[in-house]
Image (cartoon, rainbow, N blue to C red):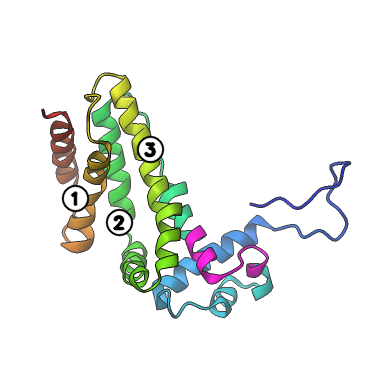
Amino acid sequence: MRKPPTSRTGRTPAGAAVLQETVTTAIRRATLAEMARVGYARLSMEAIARRAGVGKAAIYRRWPSKAALVVTVISAVAADDVVVPDTGTFRGDVHAVLIANAALLRRPMTQRILADLMAETRRAPELAAALRSDVQDRRRAKGRDLLHRAIARGELRPDVDIDLALDLLAAPLYWRIITSRRPATPEYLETLTTMIVAALNAR
């Protein structure tokens, strides 16, 4: 949350706006709910404000535009809230990431919003670029940390193709859950983990 300006004494100046976290949270939740209901193109600040129980001014004090709001909200769900654990082993890390990604992709709200955004980014290059920078690039940066840990532990060969490895951590689940509409069972996730680890260590 952005902090209000302070004086030299460290006190908040009289009249400075204090952005309440409860209001920010309500706006973010309302944005997700409205996007799932009507999609990005029909999303309006009025509807978000109404659902959140706030005035439009409360939204514009935090975000200058609908696109900025949506990118921030999606980034929080898809990048900020994604934890790449250090389980101590490469296989354990891969399995944990697959479980977390599967849980996110299974959510009906995620599926509706993701399908809409994929279509919308074809029509809105600026939105696509912002989502790529704030969501995709940051998610892949976390994945790189996982891979570099495995290399440092000697579990993954140093010359592994990092970009291809990152694709393998994400693409199979997206294809199975979103495209094919098939379940990602615990057994499937175990098998996928084994295959990814074996493939990345193949020479």
The 10 Å Cα crowd at callout 3, few under 14, some 14 to 19, many 20 or more, is: some
| Residue 36: % across, % down | 40, 71
Name the kind of residue labelled 2 in the image. Leu
- Kindly indicate whether the residue at mark 1 contacts the one at mark 2 (C-beta within 8 angstroms): no
Q: Which residue is mark 3?
A: 84
Does residue 69 lie above or below 96 as drawn? below
Residue under label 1: 172
User: In what element is the residue under mark 2?
Assistant: helix
| Residue type beneath disc 3 | Val
**Residue 105, labelled with which disc?**
2
Image point (47%, 77%), residue name: 43
Image coordinates of residue 89 in percent, x first then y, are 28, 25
Part of the protein shown in magenta: 59-72
Task: Please tell me which of labels 1 and 3 falls first in the chain.
Answer: 3
Q: CA distance from mark 1 to mark 3?
A: 18 Å
What quarter of the picture does the C terminus occupy?
top left
Specify which label sits upstream in the sequence, 3 or 2. 3
Q: Residues within 10 Å of mark 2 (few under 14, many from 20)?
A: some
* For residue 193, side relative to residue 153 (left or right): left
Q: Amino acid at mark 1?
A: Pro
Q: Determine if the magenta segment contains residue 61.
A: yes
